[in-house]
Image (tube, rainbow, N blue to C red):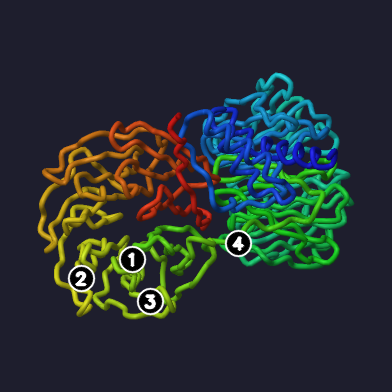
Amino acid sequence: MADEAARRLAAIERSLAREAHTLRSDPGLLWQQLYNRLQWERDLDGAVLERAESQTAADRKLWIRLRTPLKESRQLLATLEGHRDWVRSCAVGPDGAWIVSAGADKTLKIWDVGSGIEIHSLTGHRDWVTDCAASLDGTWIVSASRDRTLIVWDVSTGSALRTLTGHIDQVRACDVGPDGESIVSASADGSIRMWDVATGETTRTIAGHAGAVECCALSPNGEWLVSGGEDRTIRVWAAATGAALNSWVGHDDRILDCEFDPSGARILTASADGTLKIWEAPSGRAIMTLTGHVGEGVRSCAISPDGAWVVSAGADRTLRFWDASTGSSAGVIEGHGDELEHCAVSPDGRFALSASRDRTLKMWELSAAGEAGRSTGHLDRALDCAMSADGTWFVTAGRDFVVKVWDTATGSERHALSGHQHWVTGCAVSPDGAWIVSSSLDGTLKLWDPNTGAELRTLADIAEGGIAACAVSPDGTGIVGAGNPLKIWDVATGTTIKRARQTGAVHACAAGPDGYWVVAGVQTTLLDSTGAHVATAQGVKSSLCCATEPDGTWVVSGNEGGGLIVWSPDGGDQIRTLRGHEGGVRGCAVTSDGAYVVSGGDDSTLRVWDAVTGTEVAHLPMPGWVLCVATHPRLPEFVFGDITGGVYQAELVVPASPG
């Protein structure tokens, strides 16, 4: 019994720590968030879940129950949320008790490691803060900025001590000398500067790179300085004199980060070419290359305090771990909603820290090898989704060029449909479920058999600039492709029967039950079944998504600037506005009974609205942008996809009426 109680307590503590950033701003989500975490705990019995579920019922509030685990590794300790833009850099204080982060919102923030609470927000830079580093005694921080300056800050008060000026272009990186008296900086002006902390004066300017210097680091004994730049070279300098000791071309693209190992005998570099490399210092002899990241490069790298392993942060949204002696992969961690910008390791090696474009930092436990998150989904953004008419399966469209068919009951993938040559932007299902249509930026529509996964037909009237979305008419005889011009195809013949030039870009489309088409974009319009213009939605500007009420009495559109507008297809008059999203609304759908609107957007939330009153009745925070939503044909359930490629099922839980 004692062991069982301990397991329960540990599971609750883990879940609360992982959700602390959400609950601090919205404590009313406690039981929803706790349930959605605890249901995936391996060793937990049902008693705690029953308690969480009963509490949500007692609260008499609608809530969203996830049916799919988050695309997130189990090593997550906590998420630090507070920056209003990309988090560009991070560092851990020498005692491991605090963290500093640097953001594109022009601020630095100091965080308490134990609680995850923000201690100070440091303002003073006039542009993005690109890097930060902590002194070895933990009393001060230095930051680098695109405003061409560095600032030294007092850790205890958060006040600026002095500003270092001299660079004539963006300062890309900074480091602190082991003597605690010197700072080194790297700049887009092609130079490296050494600074005296006490006076703020430049003590040395070093030149040699052809182009911007992206990174710099001092060796543990302060003898050497290493730098890397857009010229793809790694350069080693004598820190005391600035004399060049060695240089070599190290990568096939820009070098974005560089570090010495704790012994000072090896140099680690990370590059936009997608690799990390370990070199002998200062000779430059290549020791090994670490490969595994995909996408647009490795942004940052760090080495454990004992030098045994390497951690790297990539544009592929993963944090990866490597054995420093063999170069073999030691694990992959995922959980951020956007590309990673930086990584760091605590001085005791207990946790790793990652900084992301999703505006958060995450702390990861390192007591075990990294474990990749749930693999279900797309390799890149899930851009659209649709449910079958009987609700037994659904389909998703991905930026990985793939269409996927899923089983609703099990959540398992039935088919992965390949054939498009560019992003698959949209998908829809025929009314009888006999075929799927997908749209792509390759300019084509493809029809697929959902039972076999076979391609049935490619509609050959290729649209220049690609097709942004697609929809099927209620009788299954017509398909609309959202491009400019918009095109309507006859399903039986596969020929284009109508072209309709639109005003500006087109982003989405939907079919109404009476046979009309809704076309959303710079201007949102209603067309009849032949493609003739019927009405223009009033007050709807730069719409990114649209959906129709099952009876066709109203349409909802999600705007690029935030908010949804409900409007009448009879003349386009606005009925009401649904306000709550911060940023663009990317996906929207209406439940089968017309009672609720479900939406997702750039604020990384899924929201549910009362369609009659326009009030928000439930919301679910997610790690990244929610890009698409589709509702079940009968039940209060829905599927949605996000920026990480995650594909999720969820349900709206409506408390039973009293008595």
Marker disc for residue 518:
none
Please, what is the three-letter code of the amino acid marked with disc 2?
Answer: Thr
Q: Measuring from the top left, give residue 9's x and y in whole percent.
A: 76, 36
- The first of marks 1 and 3 along the sequence is 1
- The first of marks 3 and 2 along the sequence is 3
Please, what is the three-letter code of the amino acid marked with disc 4?
Answer: Ser
The residue beneath circle 4 is: 375
Q: Quadrant of the N terminus?
A: top right
In the orientation shown, which residue stands out farthest toward the front?
A: 659
Look at the image and tell me whether residue 311 can be seen: yes
Q: Measuring from the top left, give residue 583's x and y in whole percent.
A: 40, 39
Marker disc for residue 449:
3
Where disc 4 sits, the SS reads loop
- Residue at 71% x, 28% y: name it: 200
Please indicate whether residue 545 sits to the left or right of residue 532 in the image. right
Q: CA distance from mark 1 to mark 4?
A: 25 Å
Please, what is the three-letter code of the amino acid marked with disc 3?
Answer: Asp
Q: Measuring from the top left, give residue 345's x and y in whole percent.
A: 77, 45
- The first of marks 2 and 4 along the sequence is 4
Q: Residues within 10 Å of mark 3 (few under 14, many from 20)?
A: some
Circles 2, 4 touching at the beta carbon (< 8 Å): no
The residue beneath circle 2 is: 477
Please indicate whether residue 534 sits to the left or right of residue 341 in the image. left
